[in-house]
Image (cartoon, rainbow, N blue to C red):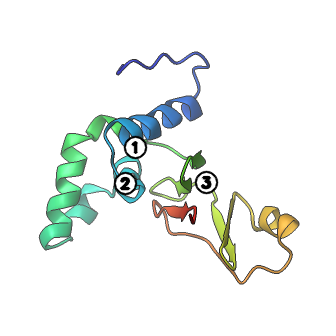
Amino acid sequence: NHGYHCTLSTDTEVMAYLFDLLGRKHRLDYAIIAKILAAPFWDEVDRLEGDEYELIKALRITYSSALVNGPFSIIVGHSKGMVGLSDRLKLRPLVAGRRGYTLYISSEECGIREVCNSPDRIWAPKAGEPVIGRLID
């Protein structure tokens, strides 16, 4: 259990621990964490080539127990920014918006427009595609 004790017994709690384990303890980049938690299906991996194929295959094998099956979308805040991620089938919504240097992530576009009525850009990331926001020093 890597020292984690789930007290709420929810999927969200487990995902928070996975982000902490992979990001803080294993020191993996959030783009890599997304490839682990919402890993592509094996038939998609087989269509990759070169270094990308080797990387995804190694992640799928090494971190197979961290693959999150089932529908989810999650927004995780950390000391250097935030990351939004949806499942690899996009069964749960995730929408992102940007205005200037400000990033917004929500489960619905109306949530973004409630706090920013005229974003420069709004988009729906692809299934398993992370939205990564980093704080500027």
Q: Is residue 67 visible?
A: no
Residue furthest to the front: 137
Label 2 vs label 3, nearer the camera: 2
Q: Quadrant of the N terminus?
A: top left
Label 1 vs label 3, nearer the camera: 1
> Do the residues under discs 1 and 3 have CB atoms within 8 angstroms?
no
Q: Is residue 25 visible?
A: yes
User: Which disc, if any, is residue 29?
Assistant: 2
Residue type (three-letter) at the residue carrying disc 3: Arg
**Could you tell whether 84 is left or right of 33 in the image?**
right
Residue 43 position within the rendered picture, expressed as x and y whole percent measured from the top left: 24, 61
Secondary structure beneath disc 1? helix
Q: Quadrant of residue 110?
A: bottom right
Label 2 Cα neighbours within 10 Å, binned few <14 / some 14-19 / many ≥20: few
* Residue indicated by mark 3: 92
Residue type (three-letter) at the residue carrying disc 1: Gly
Label 1 Cα neighbours within 10 Å, binned few <14 / some 14-19 / many ≥20: some
Q: Quadrant of the C terminus?
A: bottom right
Secondary structure beneath disc 3? loop
- Which residue does the image show at 57% across and 66% down from the upper left? 136
Q: Quadrant of residue 4?
A: top left
Mark closer to the chain start, 1 or 3: 1
- Which residue does the image show at 70% across and 57% down from the upper left? 107
- Which residue does the image show at 50% across and 37% down from the upper left? 15
Mark closer to the chain start, 2 or 1: 1
> Do the residues under discs 2 and 1 have CB atoms within 8 angstroms?
no
Q: How far is disc 2 from disc 3 in space, using C-alphas?
A: 23 Å
User: Which disc, if any, is residue 23?
Assistant: 1
- Which residue does the image show at 50% across and 30% down from the upper left? 14
